[in-house]
Amino acid sequence: AGLGGYLLWRDVRRELDLAEIRSQFAASVSHELKTPLTSIRMFAETVRLGRVKDEAARDEYVDPIINESERLSRLLNNVLDVSKIEQGKKLYRPRPQALAPILRAAVRTMDYPLRQQGFSLDLAIGEGLPDVSVDADALEQALLNLLGNAIKYSGAAREIGLELMREGPWAVIRVTDHGVGIPPGERQRIFERFYRVPSPENRQVPGTGLGLALVAHFAREHGGRLAGESQPGRGSAFALYLPLEAEP
Ligand code: ADP
């Protein structure tokens, strides 16, 4: 009876967790949709009212519309990818290519939010890295997730690092921030789908808990891995290890 009771407890417990996870997920997605939609409407209405005189002023209203739309696309891509993974669908079409242009594309996409929030990004691209077999769009999405996290969890810090280099048989892409960091007890769970560190400060930060799970999935499916390092209160670094092609 003891063991049966234990198993039953576990199963019931898992059901409850799942129900809770689902409703929390619906709440966080709705919350994440609300803010960008509100500001898109606000900026667009201002433009329509014709209060915007010159071109520079127009950009001031149009740039956030573009930026917020891009943020919505990233959120949707994450949700769609998770559901494709759950359905066992193939997500990636890797082909050998240079990684540096993919890093630069991700930086270009984040340029506006970085500038707007006063961040400086230090991009360091190592010499002589051979081509790596990756799905370029998926890698860019993974980098946007890591860079987005570096921004979201930076606290008062305003410096972010992005570097690409070779470590033995690996191409390594590392995103570094100097923000809130991750408590030791949470370091395993942050890679789980939907999981968010339940600290009071983090509750103020929008998120769905899908980003890191997707980046880790991307890494594994490309024969690599995602590694995290963190000092609470001092920052975090996430490194994406991708296998280099066997050299002839
Ligand atoms: P989200 O950011 O949408 O919550 P993620 O899966 O990207 O989801 O991250 C999971 C959790 O890991 C976050 O909620 C946050 O608590 C923690 N986390 C991720 N990246 C960082 C970081 N750079 N610094 C501190 N905490 C982080």
Image (tube, rainbow, N blue to C red):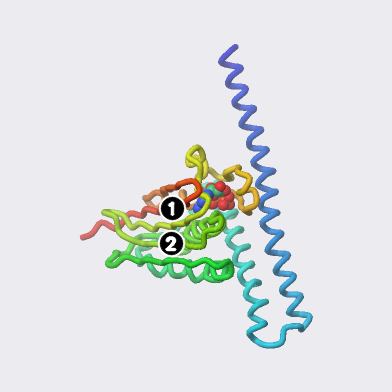
For label 1, the SS is strand
- Residue 227: image location, x then y, percent: 41, 48
- Residue 5: image location, x then y, percent: 61, 17
Q: Earlier in the sequence, mark 2 or mark 1?
A: 2
Which residue is depicted at the point 76% across and 80% down?
Answer: 48
Q: Which residue is mark 1?
A: 237
Mark 1 crowd level (few <14, some 14–19, many ≥20, 10 Å Cα): many
State which quarter of the image contains the N terminus.
top right
**Would residue 46 be found to the left or right of residue 29 on screen?**
right
> From the Cβ of disc 2, is ligand 1 less than 8 Å away?
no
- Residue 96: image location, x then y, percent: 35, 63
Amino acid carrying mark 1 in the image: Ala
Q: Which residue is mark 2?
A: 161
State which quarter of the image contains the C terminus.
bottom left
**Would residue 195 be found to the left or right of residue 57 on screen?**
left
- Residue lying at the far left of the rendered structure: 248
Which residue is depicted at the point 52% across and 59% down?
Answer: 157
Q: Is residue 113 at all visible to an observer of this figure? A: yes
80 and 74: which is toward the camera: 74
Which residue is depicted at the point 47% across and 51% down?
Answer: 234
- Residue lying at the far bottom of the rendered structure: 54
Amino acid carrying mark 2 in the image: Gly
- Callout 2 touching callout 1 (CB < 8 Å): yes
How far is the residue under mark 2 from the one under mark 1? 9 Å
- Residue lying at the far right of the rendered structure: 49
